[in-house]
Amino acid sequence: MFKKILLAVLVAAPMCLSAQTLKLGTVNPTEVFNVMPDVATANNTLKGVQEKYEAQAKPLQEELQKKQAEIESLAKNKAPEATLEAKQKEFEDLYTRYQTFMQTAQQDIQKQQETLLAPIQQKLVNAIQAVGAEGGYAGIIDANTLLYKGDNIEDITAKVKAKLGIK
């Protein structure tokens, strides 16, 4: 008796699965992300931070150029070796300070970028998930990585934009 029930289930299962069609969607998250108003605001904030660091770096760059010109002038005028070495050491110290500053600035900009963009990315993920749940989709695939799109796959990029209030 148990074998008959098991056999019936095994025979019926593939038919039940083939009778259901999976509803799949695609979305272009990059397209949606790039038109989100929050992204423009974050980019403006990051641009301001970058400009601040560039303004702080400018005096160091100018001082490096002056030191380089001074070393070249001393070498051209055949200054004593000790003087050249001292100036070269000053230049190297300043250059190390400049590199450290630029590295710290870059790390700070990257950290701020991650901090500013993470909530926006989460907002996009939440919108995609909400559209998927509301539309009864079995799955949503990134349209950028889709190699083939059949007739039963729907592009939901517009729905995600609408969910986010983007026209």
Image: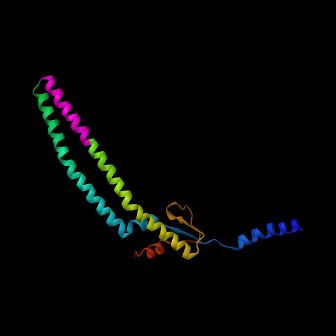
The quadrant where residue 17 appears: bottom right
Q: Which residues are magenta?
A: 80-98
Quadrant position of the C terminus in the picture: bottom left
Q: Which x, y percent locates residue 9?
A: 80, 69
Q: Does residue 142 appear left or right of residue 23 in this picture?
A: left
Q: Is residue 82 magenta?
A: yes
Q: Is residue 102 above or below residue 136?
A: above
Residue drawn where x is 16% and y is 31% of the image:
87
Q: Which x, y percent locates residue 57?
A: 22, 48
Residue drawn where x is 83% and y is 66% of the image:
6
Quadrant position of the N terminus in the picture: bottom right
Residue drawn where x is 30% and y is 47% of the image:
104
Q: Which x, y percent locates residue 117?
A: 39, 61
Dominant secondary structure, magenta:
helix
Q: Which x, y percent locates residue 107?
A: 34, 49
Residue drawn where x is 15% and y is 32% of the image:
71
Q: Does residue 128 appear left or right of residue 71 in this picture?
A: right
Q: Is residue 76 magenta?
A: no
Colour pattern of the rendering: rainbow
Residue lying at the far right of the rendered structure = 1
Residue lying at the far left of the rendered structure = 77
The quadrant where residue 136 appears: bottom right
